[in-house]
């Protein structure tokens, strides 16, 4: 079933890197890409806007790919801009297809009818999340146990006129021994400011990926938020993936 939005010159709504190892981890990146479907043109935005944080999580694809590779874990990444549809927002909510982001108007998103909204959900949102679900199921079958879902994101150093003091945030719902240990392991020796449930918290009302795929906390999960100024370059992405790999390796050895 297609919604009629993506055509033969458009890319898949997700890319997957699958590995044959027995890692207990599954990685996903909801805001990895900045593609715009051909049919939507530039959605009325300047080229600089389409490469800015309002369009994608800067640096997260490279960082996630390195980290998942080091840990021999699968990665599913979304390829289209969150300005087209945000794959971490429940369809129908106000931020699912934003009309304004960080004070900038997205002209093509104004006054969309239901058919146009459904086309974005059918062609981009649901195929991506179907791929995440299949990957989790495959990992669970290989492990004969539940994998840990790791959602990867980046955030801006400054928001609403205020600086954010954290370098990395570890988000989770409910108690999480893994999150507790990972926060300590990342901070130990890295010199990075690591916080819990910062700069955001998981919202059961608006967020989609972790509430849905982690089944409201019954599947082990964490979300990693990295300040984008640390991973805006290839060198930064490699350095961060090294830091996170070492932290994951240490925590996994303990559980």
Image: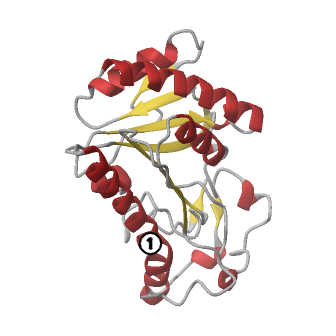
Q: How is the image coloured?
A: secondary structure
Between 152 and 164, the one lying in front of the other is 152
Q: Is residue 35 left or right of residue 248?
A: right
Residue at the (37%, 54%) spot, across then down: 209
- Tell me if residue 193 comes above or below residue 8 in the rendering: above
- Residue at 33% x, 36% y is 172
Residue 171 vertical position relative to residue 122 in the rendered view, above or below: above
- The quarter of the picture where the N terminus appears is bottom left
In percent of width and height, residue 107 lies at 65, 75
Front residue of 149/81: it is 149
Q: x and y percent of residue 236 in the render? A: 72, 31
Give the residue pinned by disc 1.
Answer: 127
Q: Nearer the viewer, residue 220 or 21?
A: 21
Location of residue 232 (image quadrant): top right
Q: Where's residue 88, x and y in %?
A: 43, 57
Q: Residue at x 22, y 43 (%)?
A: 145
Q: Give the crowd class for mark 1: few <14, some 14-19, many >=20 residues within 10 Å.
A: some
* Residue farthest left in this picture: 218
Q: Is residue 24 above or below residue 102?
A: above
Q: Can the viewer see residue 125?
A: yes
Furthest residue in direction right, as rendered? 47
């Amino acid at each position: 079933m297609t919604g009629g939005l993506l055509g033969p010159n458009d890319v898949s709504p997700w890319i997957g890197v699958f590995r044959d190892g027995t890692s207990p981890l599954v990685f996903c990146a909801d805001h990895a890409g900045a593609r715009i479907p051909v049919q939507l043109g530039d959605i009325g935005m300047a080229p600089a806007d389409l490469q800015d944080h309002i369009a994608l999580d800067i640096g997260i694809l490279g960082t996630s790919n390195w980290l998942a590779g080091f840990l021999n874990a699968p990665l599913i990444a979304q390829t289209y801009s969150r300005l087209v549809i945000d794959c971490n927002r429940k369809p129908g909510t106000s931020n699912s297809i934003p009309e304004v982001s960080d004070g900038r108007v997205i002209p093509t998103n104004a006054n969309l009818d239901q058919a146009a909204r459904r086309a974005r959900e059918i062609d981009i949102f649901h195929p991506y999340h179907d791929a995440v679900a299949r990957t989790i199921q495959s990992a669970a079958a290989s492990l004969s146990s539940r994998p840990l879902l790791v959602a990867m994101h980046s955030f801006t150093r400054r928001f609403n006129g205020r600086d954010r003091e954290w370098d990395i945030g570890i988000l989770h719902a409910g108690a999480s021994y893994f999150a507790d240990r990972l926060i300590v392991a990342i901070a130990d020796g890295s010199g990075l400011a690591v916080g819990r449930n910062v700069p955001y918290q998981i919202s059961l009302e608006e967020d989609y990926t972790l509430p849905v795929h982690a089944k409201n906390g019954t599947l082990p999960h964490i979300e990693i938020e990295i300040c984008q100024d640390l991973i805006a370059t290839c060198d930064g992405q490699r350095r961060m993936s090294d830091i996170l790999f070492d932290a994951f390796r240490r925590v996994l050895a303990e559980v």
